Image (cartoon, rainbow, N blue to C red):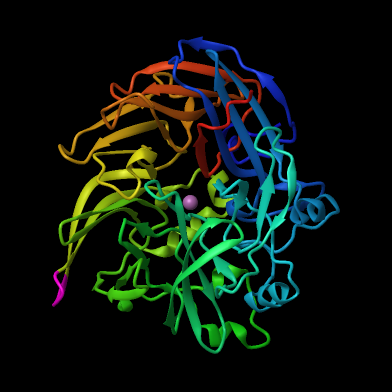
Amino acid sequence: MTARTSLGFHTLTDEIDHDCTVVGTLPDWLSGTLIRNGPGAFEVGDSAVDHWFDGLAMLHAFTFGDGGVTYRNRFLRTEAYESARNGSFESGFATGETTLRDRLKAFLFEKPYDNANIIAERIGDDYLALTELPRWVSFDPDTLETLGHVRYDGPAPTGQLACAHLKRDPETDELVNFETAFGRRCHYHVYSMSAATNRRHICSIPVDDPAYMHSFALTPNYVVLTEFPFVVNPLDFLKPGTQGPFIENFEWKPERGTRFLVIDRRRGAVVAEPRTDAFFGFHHANAYEDGDELVIDLETIPDATAIDTLYLDTLRRGRFDVLSGRLERFRVELDGKRTTIERERLHDGTALPTVSPARWCRRHRYVYAQSPDQPMTTWPQAVTKIDTETGRAVEFADETGDHRFSEPIFVPNPDGGREDDGVVLTVALHRDEGRSSLVVLDGESFAELARARIPNPIPFDFHGRFFPELTGR
Ligand code: CO
């Protein structure tokens, strides 16, 4: 029996296909599938992981159509999953004594860690589960069955670390991403792709001490890498005898400040690299161009000690303080001569910020996010809609205080005009009942429209994507 306080950081063993009971009314236009990805198991037999990010990947699919919802969940059948079932969790983000040297060796032997538990994406015709290594796991989007590994082996330069949050330009349907290559000379290799096997190299940026960057910003003309001063010295960890989990090889070096690497997407050139104060962050909400300015909405955290609080023993004790960030807006002016950065606080106390996919790379007004209490002593009990024009925010919370909410995902009404004409989907974990539900909120009023009952408690997860083409028919 899982203790109530640690429910959410528990292991879910059941894999089910379920026709949900729906309370309330779903909009007629809502059709498609939300696929969420996250850690589903932290122990198998006597073997366990230490860090939240290292739980075994589990996919959850919520399919909407004809006024109903079906739910299905499956573990990814990865090498990491098989080895956990055979008694040993493999090297992960922060579990075990795996060194980055070992990890590079594993890369050379063509078998990087495949526990792809961060997000699910469509790339061309493939549906892929992604993590921070450049080896993706493809799955059947209808059955969630694992199909195999996908790895780019074309002429564009590649690296050993990948960014899980690749960005889609909705205008061109192009996906942009970067990989970090370690060696005598390290590089960030930036590229775009139309299919998993088809890359266009944009540029390669030499770097002495590569930074840990969980996401980045994209606009129609620019790629922006926000290089936080959480860096690794490759000479230190490439030498024999380096110990410790992968992420512990990175060091917080605030004296470096944070650098915005602004890359022209078409010319493949760095056009500006202004620095500002040191801060850390995981998630860029969105970015757009406003005349000569780039506007970047980013969730910031004062420093990278956040990583240390994501160990499971800390989370299960109810310590979440630095999971909660601040939504900030950075304006980077590109006037050709000098580059200035303006920094503006938009909202205190957010986690996992998102915008309408119709506004990716374009000017947005609304940001949706989890809304943790301040200080954060439990998983978020509310979600929020932030109006970046007025500064106002409206919250949705369960009155009983029993619910814990996931990242909110906005689904635009295909016939709608306003930016917030649509619904927001979030998974609520009901702690008293020990189960979850999928909650559907009205995008404009933020009032509840419907909820679909899930018989099992879904562990807290990372990210979801809504795929309107997956109608389940
Ligand atoms: Co993320």
Task: Find the residue positioned furthest to the right.
Answer: 86
Horizontal relation, residue 182 to residue 177: left or right: right
Horizontal relation, residue 105 to residue 306: left or right: right
Q: Is residue 17 above or below residue 311?
A: above
Identity of the residue drawn at 39% across and 27% down: 414
Identity of the residue drawn at 66% across and 25% down: 456
- Note whether residue 445 is visible: yes
The picture quadrant where one finds residue 335 is bottom left
Give residue 384's position: percent from left, percent from top.
33, 33
Magenta stretch prevailing secondary structure? loop
Tally of numbered discs? 0
Give residue 467's position: percent from left, percent from top.
52, 35
Give residue 443's position: percent from left, percent from top.
33, 26
Write the start and end of the magenta stretch as one range: 335-339
Residue 337 part of the magenta-drawn span: yes
Instruction: State which quarter of the image contains the N terminus.
Output: top right
The picture quadrant where one finds residue 434 is top right
Residue 211 part of the magenta-drawn span: no
Horizontal relation, residue 132 to residue 374: left or right: right
Q: Is residue 188 above or below residue 327?
A: below
Give residue 436's position: percent from left, percent from top.
57, 25
Identity of the residue drawn at 43% across and 24% down: 401
